[in-house]
Image: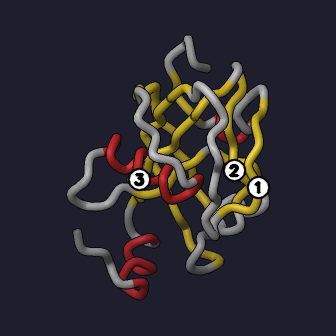
Amino acid sequence: MSFIPDKLYKQILGNTVNLCVDVCLRYNDEVVLIKRTEEPVKGVFWPIGGRIHKGETAEEAARRKIKEEIGIDFDGALIPVGFYEDQYTENSFSRNTDYCTLSIVFAGELDDVPMFKLDETSEEISTFPALPERFRVQTFLHEEFA
């Protein structure tokens, strides 16, 4: 799988919609969220997620992001439950960049709390009774998940 060089990726971000995944893992009827260290939504507890790479399916991207961001090999079911779209003025590369995303949202259940290992894009992990308001407002989810 090849990756886009940062310089080219910055140009692409300003001119396209970024296709992503967001993963809403639940444990004991609460959602697992990570506090982000990078834009967009820096300092906010947010679902696990990120862009889909060329050559991988959305589900493969979701499983990769779980592994990268919280350090677990999640082998449970991941069910696509809707989509999330947003527009930002900041991203991890620069400020003042129109940055549009369209995310396929997956839901999964954790049976227990494994030993999490956060990557550099997160500083904390916790569970919450609901998804962040910004995420809920701009997400189109199946009724049973909303």
Residue at x-position 55% and y-position 54%: 71
The residue beneath circle 2 is: 34
Q: Position of residue 21 (x, y in %)?
A: 45, 46
Write down the residue under mark 3: 64
Q: What is the quadrant of the C terminus in the image?
A: top right
Cβ–Cβ below 8 Å for labels 1 and 2?
yes
- Which residue is at a point 61% across and 65% down the rendered structure image? 119
Residue at the image position 43 percent from the left and 29 percent from the top:
76
Q: Disc 1 or 2, which lies upstream in sequence? A: 2
- Say which residue appears at 78% left-offset and 26% top-offset: 129
Separation of residues labelled 1 and 2 (CA atoms)? 6 Å
Q: Earlier in the sequence, mark 2 or mark 3?
A: 2
Three-letter residue code for mark 3: Arg
Q: Residues within 10 Å of mark 2 (few under 14, many from 20)?
A: many
Kind of residue sitting beneath label 1: Glu
Camera-nearest residue between 24 and 92: 24
Q: Quadrant of residue 95?
A: bottom right
**C-alpha span from label 2 to label 3:** 15 Å
- Secondary structure of the residue carrying tag 2 is strand
- Under circle 3, the secondary element is helix
Q: Position of residue 135 (x, y in %)?
A: 65, 39
- Tell me: 28 left or right of 91: right
Name the residue that disc number 1 marks. Answer: 124
> Residue lying furthest bottom in this view?
7
> Earlier along the polypeptide chain: callout 3 or callout 1?
3
- Residue 5 picture location, percent across and down: 35, 84
